[in-house]
């Protein structure tokens, strides 16, 4: 496939690896804040070939992993108590709520559907005018335009039976929260390429300046990730803290203004509770008052119960880069993808699930 | 979750009461539909990045080669320094 296959070329990956080996003199810890990058780094075995000086930690970049249990409970309540057609991306279904997951709700007869796109949920609402249809709108800035667009499609079609349960989170406030933690050991970041495709690079310059850390906007294929790491390590070794765009074939400096216009029409910035981390101010999106009819929380009078079940999951420390999955006493023992204690073991993009699937432990 | 895949725009049609430009995008032969509402300049033959049914960026052909050129240049510079 064009623009995919050539970025998986082992010789180029090893070329960048040799460059990294030739310049690295000190230990550095680098964090990526994107579950897709976590998955790719582990799946392609890149973590195993990096020189011992480099430690990669995996930040809160998997939206499923940071969605609080209270929101899962609300989704389950919509499906079971309010009997809506609850539509979601597949990853959300197995995340445990306080009483059950959405998959268990489906097993009990609730109408829970896995969709590829929120726009499909609008079409379902058109097809079933007598049913309420709710899309569980999770995601980072990359997914926000599509979720907002579904509201605009529903609005344009005059639908009264479509709404979204919003769990949107933003990357820059999460990076700040990690750097504000006095225990942080992160020296530099791979910034999430597809988030910047929408938002552009401007939010990252003040972060590089304030915290004196390099940020390299990076793609998802092995060549991208290895070049992104090289550009980060090169800056660290040279004492630089700049924003560099490795993923320029896709990310424009200004991002995608048409996509941001859609976000700004439907959403406003709000505080968000991140599972395992807590409330981060102005770190997510909520539906604007103007579109309250499409806000499932308001429409169904849902109340957030913020209490989390105590399971022994150390997701908070993992998402902040303080610990790695294998530091957890439950990893691969009492916590597996089939019986997860916490969300990072559920989503294919969660750090624990990625380590589990590609470390050989499953065999 | 932020997975987005590059594919080639094969055709474009107006859908939803002629309000939305929708593309048929080929991902190595597998065809999916994608909204072009956030990429109004996209045309047939372009490679676009698609995320959850929405095209979010056009792949820049010129920039796409840079990752390979950069490595070659870095190697040449290294040789000059030794």
Image (tube, grey):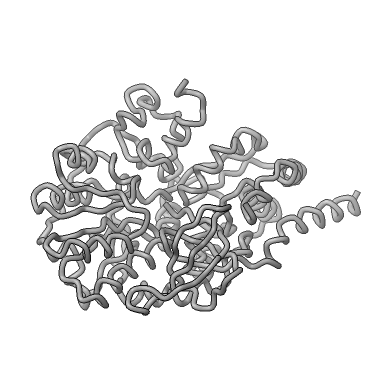
Viewer-closest of A302 and B40: B40
- Marks counted in the figure total 0
Residue B45 in view in this figure: yes
Give me the residue at 54% from left, 58% from top. Answer: B26
In this rendering, would A227 be left or right of A76? right
Please determine whether, in this image, residue A346 is positioned above or below residue A77: above
In the shown orientation, is residue A12 left or right of residue A335? Answer: right
Viewer-side residue, A204 vs A91? A91
Say left or right for B54 vs A223.
left
Tell whether A320 sits left or right of A214.
left
- Closer-to-camera residue (B19/A62): B19
Up/down of A214 relative to A11, above or below: below
* x and y, in percent, of residue B60 in the image: 64, 68
Q: Is residue A172 in sight in this rendering?
A: no
- Above or below, comparing residue A4 to residue A147 in the picture: above
From what the image shows, is residue A314 above or below residue A243? above
Q: Position of residue A330 (x, y in %)?
A: 35, 26
* Residue depicted at 28% across the width and 31% down the height: A312
Image spot of residue A14 (x, y percent)? 73, 41
* Residue in the image at 34% along x and 35% along y: A314
Residue A219's image quarter?
Answer: bottom right
Q: Residue at x 71, y 67 (%)?
A: B62
- Where is residue B69 drawn, in percent x and y? 77, 58
Q: Nearer the viewer, residue A168 or A115?
A: A115
């Amino acid at each position: 496939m064009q623009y995919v296959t050539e970025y998986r070329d082992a010789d180029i990956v090893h070329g960048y690896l040799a460059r990294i080996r030739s310049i690295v003199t000190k230990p550095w810890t680098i964090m990526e804040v994107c579950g897709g990058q976590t998955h790719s780094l582990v799946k392609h075995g890149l973590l195993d070939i990096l020189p011992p000086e480099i430690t990669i930690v995996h930040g809160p970049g998997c939206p499923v992993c940071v969605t609080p249990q209270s929101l899962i409970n609300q989704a389950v309540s919509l499906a079971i108590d309010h009997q809506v057609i609850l539509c979601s991306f597949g990853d959300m279904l197995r995340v445990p709520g306080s009483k059950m997951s959405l998959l268990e709700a489906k097993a009990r007869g609730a109408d829970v559907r896995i969709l590829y796109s929120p726009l499909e949920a609008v079409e379902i609402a058109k097809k079933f005018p007598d049913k309420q249809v709710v899309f569980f709108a999770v995601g980072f800035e990359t997914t926000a335009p599509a979720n907002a667009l579904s509201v605009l499609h529903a609005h344009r079609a005059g639908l009264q039976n479509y709404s979204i349960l919003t769990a949107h989170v933003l990357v820059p406030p999460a990076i700040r929260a990690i750097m504000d933690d006095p225990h942080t050991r992160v020296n530099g970041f791979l910034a999430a390429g597809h988030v910047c495709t929408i938002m552009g690079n401007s939010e990252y310059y003040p972060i590089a300046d304030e915290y004196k850390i390099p940020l390299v906007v990076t793609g998802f294929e092995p060549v991208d990730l290895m070049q992104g790491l090289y550009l980060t390590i090169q800056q660290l070794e040279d004492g630089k803290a700049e924003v560099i765009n490795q993923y320029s074939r896709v990310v424009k400096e200004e991002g995608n203004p048409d996509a941001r216009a859609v976000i700004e029409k439907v959403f406003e910035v709000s505080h968000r509770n991140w599972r395992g981390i807590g409330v981060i101010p102005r770190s997510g999106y909520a539906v604007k008052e103007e579109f309250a009819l499409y806000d499932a929380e308001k429409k169904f009078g849902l109340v957030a119960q913020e209490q989390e079940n105590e399971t022994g999951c150390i997701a908070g420390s993992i998402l902040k880069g303080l610990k790695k999955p294998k530091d957890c006493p439950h990893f691969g023992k009492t916590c597996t993808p089939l019986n997860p204690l916490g969300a990072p073991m559920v989503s294919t993009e969660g750090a624990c699930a990625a380590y589990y699937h590609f470390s050989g432990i499953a065999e | 979750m932020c997975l987005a895949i590059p594919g080639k725009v094969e055709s474009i049609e107006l859908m939803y009461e002629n309000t939305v430009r929708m593309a048929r995008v080929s991902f190595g032969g597998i065809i999916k539909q994608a909204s072009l509402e956030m990429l109004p300049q996209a045309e047939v033959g372009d490679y676009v990045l698609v995320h959850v049914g929405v095209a979010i960026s056009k792949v820049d052909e010129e920039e796409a080669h840079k990752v390979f050129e950069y490595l070659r240049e870095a190697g040449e510079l290294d040789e000059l320094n030794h």
